[in-house]
Image (cartoon, rainbow, N blue to C red):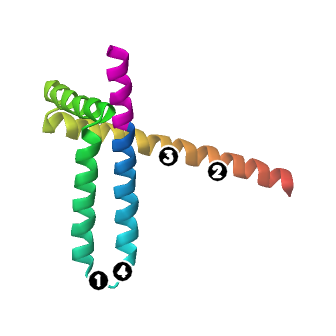
């Protein structure tokens, strides 16, 4: 009995994904078909079609798990201890100094290799 319910749910999910794909394709086609119309109206139409497609996709098993993942990620982001402004500034300064030092080292290396190859060629 449980297998039959799972199988029916899988078929329903596939039908929903096909409907989502059809909405996306129809939105793209209608947008190009009405290319002479106002960009604002076409954009609103595409947003409405995308919203409906997203709502239908959220009704599937994979869509629901994606929404759960996003909600869990939001909870995890709240747990992060973000650096203070001073820490961010100090880290940025250190990174910029290291970039300048590496750039100078690479410039010197390039100059030495260029001089060595130039003396070898001539």
Say if the magenta span includes residue 8.
yes
Question: Which x, y percent locates residue 8?
Answer: 35, 28
Instruction: State which mark lies toward you, 3 or 2.
Output: 3
Q: Residues within 10 Å of mark 4 (few under 14, many from 20)?
A: few
Mark 2 element type: helix
Q: Residue furthest top?
A: 1
Question: Which x, y percent locates residue 115?
Answer: 72, 51
Instruction: State which mark lies toward you, 4 or 2.
Output: 4
Check residue 35 in the rendering and tell me which mark sits there, or answer none: 4
User: Between disc 4 and disc 2, whose residue precedes?
Assistant: 4
Q: Residue furthest bottom?
A: 36
Front-lying residue, 78 or 102: 78
Q: Badge 1 is on which residue?
A: 37
Residues at circles 3 and 1 in contact by the CB criterion of under 8 Å: no
Mark 1 element type: loop
- For marks 4 and 2, give the CA distance: 56 Å
Quadrant location of the N terminus in the rendered image: top left
Residues at circles 2 and 1 in contact by the CB criterion of under 8 Å: no
């Amino acid at each position: 009995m449980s297998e039959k319910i799972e199988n029916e749910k899988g078929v329903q999910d596939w039908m929903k994904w096909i409907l989502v794909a059809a909405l996306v394709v129809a939105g793209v086609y209608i947008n190009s078909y009405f290319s002479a119309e106002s960009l604002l109206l076409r954009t609103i139409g595409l947003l409405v079609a995308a919203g409906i497609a997203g709502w239908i996709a959220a009704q599937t098993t994979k869509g629901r798990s994606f929404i759960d993942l996003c909600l869990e990620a939001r909870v995890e982001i709240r747990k992060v201890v973000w650096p203070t402004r001073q820490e961010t500034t100090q880290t940025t300064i250190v990174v910029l100094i290291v970039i300048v030092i590496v750039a100078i080292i690479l410039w010197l290396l390039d100059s030495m290799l260029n001089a060595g190859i130039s003396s070898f060629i001539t």
